[in-house]
Amino acid sequence: MNRRLSLFAAGKGNGRGGASRRGRAGGRVLVALLCGMFALLPGCGPFPAVESAHQAAPITVETYEGTFATVNSFIVSNGKSLVIIDAQRKSAEAEKLVARVKRYHLPVTDIVITHGHTDHFTGMPVLLKAFPAARIVVAKEAIRRDIKNYAIYMGASGATAAEPVLEPALRPRTAATPDGFDYERTIHVLPGNSLAMDGGGRLELTANYKPTEAPHMTTIYIPAVNALFLSDLGYNHVHFWMGDDLSREAILNWRAALESVLARYKDLNPTVYPGHGPPGDLSIVEAGIGYIDDILRVTTPPTTRARAFSEMIKLYPDYKESDFFLKYSLENLVPL
């Protein structure tokens, strides 16, 4: 019997030359149970805690808030590797993000871009230069197309009142611009709806939303720490962007998406990380639904941009980006 126990404890009872972690853990469980029943068995004594095959990685999340447009990037760590979510709007901001990431002294495996707006992808070349072994990944092919198409649009239109000029490193690679960014080869589409971290933990991606704040949007959930990343479905104490690339139909889709997120995650009550503004809880989602209802109401004709601006400021006096996001949203939603 002692020999049999030793075989199980060594993980050799499965007929293989070696044992998996699960086999070793199972052997320790059996030994512990038998020793509990037969305390006088030779060799029975204190046993170390059994390692669970599903033990959650010690994941942490750090928010980096950029100064341009109050846009967030996130550094996800499991103590062995890092994943970065979104890349900032300007190279100078991306450089600051790099400095924060380097403090971890851990390899960056992936940079997830949630959607195709410049405030979330402009920093890609800076991050790749700092972390050349990292992959840039998106949840679906449509997001890769959105990123490239938006870069082409920004490059063609130049600087606008709302947006700075596209940075040269993001000009698509062509025969005329051989040093440009190769969107097809540099941005990788994930084969499924999850991303496993090196060293433990996974990110669950959802990208089946109708057009909302962007044509295609990704939200991310990390089960190990009950963390929900809303991307630009979520703004917290920041006025929503509803500029000239959004229709009222897309805004209503946005509201419906927030309703679906609230229903899906209500019982989990996760920590919520919005694309703009500080983290919080699901009240961010509830407040977002209310914000959409309010801005659609105050922009319903007959009204003026000045009147709608005044009403929104009264309703949301402490919200940031009133002279940027709110201003250009009202130019889109209220006719002259």
Image (tube, rainbow, N blue to C red):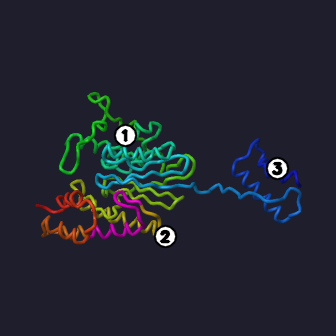
Q: Secondary structure at mark 2?
A: loop
Left or right of 227 on screen, residue 298: left
Residue 150 in the magenta stretch? The answer is no
Is residue 107 depicted above or below 219 in this figure?
above
Q: Which residue is identified by label 2?
A: 267
Identity of the residue drawn at 47% across and 68% down: 269
Identity of the residue drawn at 23% across and 48% down: 163
Q: Which residue is identified by label 3?
A: 7
Q: Which range is magenta?
A: 273-293
User: Where does the image place residue 92, in percent across and percent down from the top left?
Assistant: 32, 44
Left or right of 319 on screen, residue 106: right
Residue 277 in the magenta stretch? The answer is yes
Q: Which residue is identified by label 1?
A: 126
- Foreground mark, 2 or 1? 1
Circles 1 and 3 in contact, beta carbons < 8 Å: no
Separation of marks 2 and 1 at Cα, in angstroms: 39 Å
Q: Secondary structure at mark 1?
A: helix
Give the crowd class for mark 1: few <14, some 14-19, many >=20 residues within 10 Å. many
Could you tell which of marks 2 and 1 lies nearer the N-terminus? 1
What kind of residue is marked 2?
Answer: Asp
Circles 2 and 3 in contact, beta carbons < 8 Å: no
Q: Which of the numbered marks, if any, corresponds to residue 202?
A: none
- Foreground mark, 1 or 3? 1
Could you tell which of marks 1 and 3 lies nearer the N-terminus? 3
What kind of residue is marked 1?
Answer: Val
User: On the rendered image, what quadrant is the C terminus found in?
Assistant: bottom left
What kind of residue is marked 3?
Answer: Leu
Q: Secondary structure at mark 3?
A: helix
Identity of the residue drawn at 36% across and 63% down: 257
Give the crowd class for mark 2: few <14, some 14-19, many >=20 residues within 10 Å. few
Is residue 203 depicted above or below 92 in this figure?
below
